């Protein structure tokens, strides 16, 4: 099987899934008018997708391990296409929100399995390059989201942001069935208690972050959700230490590559998604640009992964992941801090270009090397679980990034005038830069040399599971 087919087909899935995180943002004003939606409805048009996406990725990985990664990847793509059709045909906001939930469920199945399939089709010495291209495509989708959403909404209609998924998703599903080989994880049974505990725990934590801007961080709803989420995650960890077939073996956290890469992923997306949310508002509310113009101006930042991520991924195969994770988080911190420092009413775009480019290069250096470090720290049979854990932490980080930056914004500014908006956004971007700096510290503790495909600490788990599978088959 040619690895190029795997790279192309999983990249299509990653592009569509990542695009739908952002593409709806610039269509929201039109959706509000045509569907008579409230502000809360518009928020949930975004949050419904992100909540399901963040909470169910470990579940998607486990289903792929049990029933076949190719089979479940294709199922995820088909479900994503079906939900996109329902979203495009929705005549009211309730149907649209339901479709967005199903899209998020489908994305949670397909995205981690795309990484698992990619890892399965590439040898370790070429995996960094492949992850770099995958990361570049995902980054391009995030970059293109606001531009594509604005262009389609202005040129056609908002429904076409969902119709766009249909032909590409169907082609990828059909070709994946034919061109990709099947693979399974080492566990013969689903860890049902683990699935329920981690899904409910992540839902409670992300619910708290999503509701905090409206209900307040000190409200009973938010505090209760945080407490319940923490208790459920602790329960999940306790159960995983005792489960006969754990969905996430705790031994993996003994690997520095696995643990530090996941920490970097959390703080990177805390910073990235939170700052992207407010940067788009700065260009529109603070500086008076339209949605399409805002998307085009942000391209010098968000399009960098398409250019830099493949190069960084390829070089990491020889130099290791740590230099790129450290350097990437440092550049992201410098770039965002620079933007925060120069942001003021009437600031010229020329003053923002260089720091945006620096931050974009930083993002690009982290995307492939974080994925490569996570994949290389577990046995090859468990890359799906590793990808699910990594992507879950990314999404949870992004949700908390938006929520906490919103707290800083509200404490330092408002939407009453462009000047007040920029004041609040500048303060929020300082927090985003600080989160990136924390990510630098985490990256410094990552391994300095390329790791073998199977981490020694995880080997006993793999051997135990394989022995048990063999005993059952025998």
Image (spheres, helix red, strand yellow):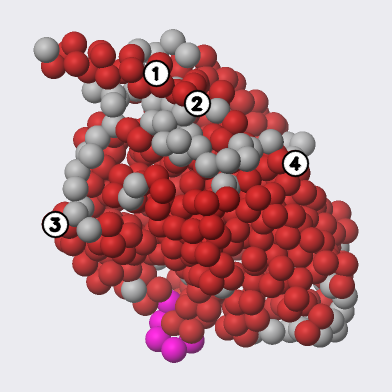
Magenta region's main secondary structure?
loop
- Is residue 351 shown above or below 61? below
Which numbered disc covers residue 461? 1
Residue that carries the numbered disc 4 in the rendered image: 441
Determine if residue 359 is in view. Answer: yes
Report whether 52 appears left or right of 356.
left
The residue where tag 3 is placed is 178
Q: Quadrant of residue 277?
A: bottom right
Residue at x 25% of width, y 61% of height: 5
Tell me, yes or no, whether the two marked residues, 1 and 2, touch with CB atoms within 8 Å: yes
User: Separation of disc 3 and disc 2 at Cα?
Assistant: 33 Å
Question: What is the magenta range?
Answer: 154-158
Helix, strand or loop at label 1? It is helix
Q: CA distance from mark 1 to mark 2?
A: 9 Å
Question: Which disc, if any, is residue 252?
Answer: 2
Residue at mark 4 to residue at mark 1: CA–CA distance: 29 Å
Position above or below: 341 against 195: below
Q: Nearer the viewer, residue 139 or 220?
A: 139
Q: Which one is nearer the viewer's eye here, 127 or 319? A: 319
């Amino acid at each position: 099987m040619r690895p190029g087919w795997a790279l192309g087909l999983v990249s299509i899935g990653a592009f569509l899934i990542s695009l739908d995180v952002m593409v709806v943002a610039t269509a929201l004003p039109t959706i509000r008018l045509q569907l008579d939606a409230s502000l809360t409805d518009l928020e949930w048009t975004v949050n419904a997708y992100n909540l399901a996406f963040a909470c169910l990725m470990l579940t998607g990985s486990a289903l792929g391990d049990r029933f076949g990664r190719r089979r479940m990847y294709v199922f995820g793509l088909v479900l994503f296409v079906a939900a996109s059709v329902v979203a495009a045909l929705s005549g009211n906001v309730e149907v649209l929100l339901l479709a967005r939930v199903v899209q998020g469920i489908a994305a949670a199945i397909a995205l981690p399995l795309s990484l698992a399939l990619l890892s399965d089709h590439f040898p370790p010495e070429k995996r960094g390059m492949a992850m770099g291209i995958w990361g570049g495509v995902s980054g391009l989708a995030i970059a293109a989201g606001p531009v594509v959403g604005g262009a389609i909404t202005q040129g056609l209609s908002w429904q076409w942001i969902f119709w766009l998924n249909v032909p590409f998703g169907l082609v990828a599903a059909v070709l994946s069935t034919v061109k990709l080989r099947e693979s399974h994880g080492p566990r013969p049974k689903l860890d049902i208690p683990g699935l329920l505990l981690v899904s409910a725990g992540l839902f409670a934590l992300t619910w708290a972050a999503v509701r905090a801007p409206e209900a307040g961080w000190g409200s009973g709803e938010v505090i209760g959700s945080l407490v319940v989420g923490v208790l459920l995650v602790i329960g999940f960890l306790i159960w995983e230490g005792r489960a006969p077939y754990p969905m996430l073996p705790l031994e993996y956290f003994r690997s520095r590559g696995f643990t530090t890469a996941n920490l970097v992923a959390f703080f990177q997306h805390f910073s990235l998604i939170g700052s992207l949310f407010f940067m788009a508002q700065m260009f529109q509310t603070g500086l008076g640009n339209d949605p399409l113009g805002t998307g085009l101006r942000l391209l010098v930042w968000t399009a960098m992964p398409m250019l830099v991520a493949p190069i960084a991924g390829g070089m990491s195969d020889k130099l290791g992941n740590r230099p790129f994770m450290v350097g990437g988080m440092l550049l992201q911190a410098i770039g965002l801090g620079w933007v925060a420092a120069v942001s003021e009413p009437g600031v010229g775009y020329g003053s923002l270009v260089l720091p945006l480019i620096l931050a974009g290069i930083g993002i690009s250096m982290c995307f492939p090397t974080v994925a490569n470090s996570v994949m290389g720290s577990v046995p090859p049979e468990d890359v799906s679980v590793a990808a699910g854990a990594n992507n879950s932490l990314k999404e949870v980080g992004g949700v908390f990034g938006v929520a906490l930056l919103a707290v800083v914004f509200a404490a330092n500014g408002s939407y009453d005038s462009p000047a007040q908006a920029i004041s609040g956004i500048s303060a929020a971007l300082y927090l985003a830069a600080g989160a990136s700096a924390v990510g630098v510290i985490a990256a410094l503790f990552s391994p300095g040399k390329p790791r073998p495909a199977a981490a020694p600490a995880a080997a006993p788990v793999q051997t135990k599971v394989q022995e048990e599978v063999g005993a059952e088959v025998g």
